[in-house]
Image (tube, rainbow, N blue to C red):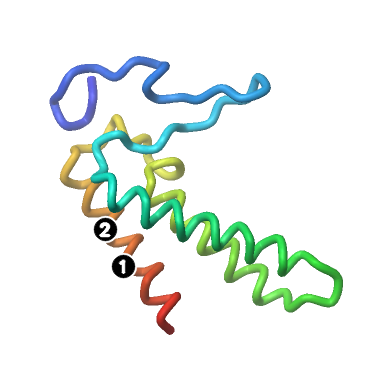
Amino acid sequence: MAGDGGEETSEVERWLVIDGRRWRRTDPSLPEDVVAALTSHLGRARSAVRTARRPGADPDALAAARARVDLAKHGLGERGPYWWDRPEDERREAALSALAELEALTDG
């Protein structure tokens, strides 16, 4: 059963398979604007990881970029506890918290 007492989610709703590898899908209960903002942060963080992996780059910058990727993926429900095992309000709060933290990192 889904963690929010709703209907059971299917494997197709939970996982995306690319080249034989399973990837957890984004939590479908999250508001579109929150998903868009988290996805934007994820893209920028991934770009920062690529930049920080270049020769001579600052290792602290790489660690910070990877932490931002992790935070965005947790907010989207793609890492951490399975979203389908958690109540919807808890998942939404986690996404909003991750977004607020990413926004603070961006503004800081």
Q: Which circle marks residue 96 in the picture?
A: 2
* Left or right position of 82 against 88: right
* Point 41% across, 50% down: residue: 74
Label 2 amino acid? Answer: Leu
Quadrant that contains the N terminus:
top left
Q: Secondary structure at mark 1?
A: helix
Name the side, left or right, on which 67 lies relative to 20.
Answer: left
Q: Position of residue 89 (x, y in %)?
A: 16, 45
Pick the front one: 33 or 81:
33
The spot of residue 90 in percent (x, y) is 20, 47
Tell me if mark 2 has few (under 14), some (14-19) or many (20+) residues whose alpha carbon lies within 10 angstroms of its own. Answer: some
Q: Mark 1 highlights which residue?
A: 100
Q: Is residue 42 above or below residue 85?
A: below
Q: Is residue 37 left or right of residue 59?
A: left
Residue 68: give x, y in percent of width and height.
Answer: 51, 63
**Res 55 → quadrant:** bottom right
Q: Are marks 2 and 1 in contact (CB under 8 Å)?
A: yes
Residue in view at x 59 percent, y 66 percent: 65
Q: Residue at x 81, y 67 (%)?
A: 54
Which residue is at 15% across, 23% downward?
6
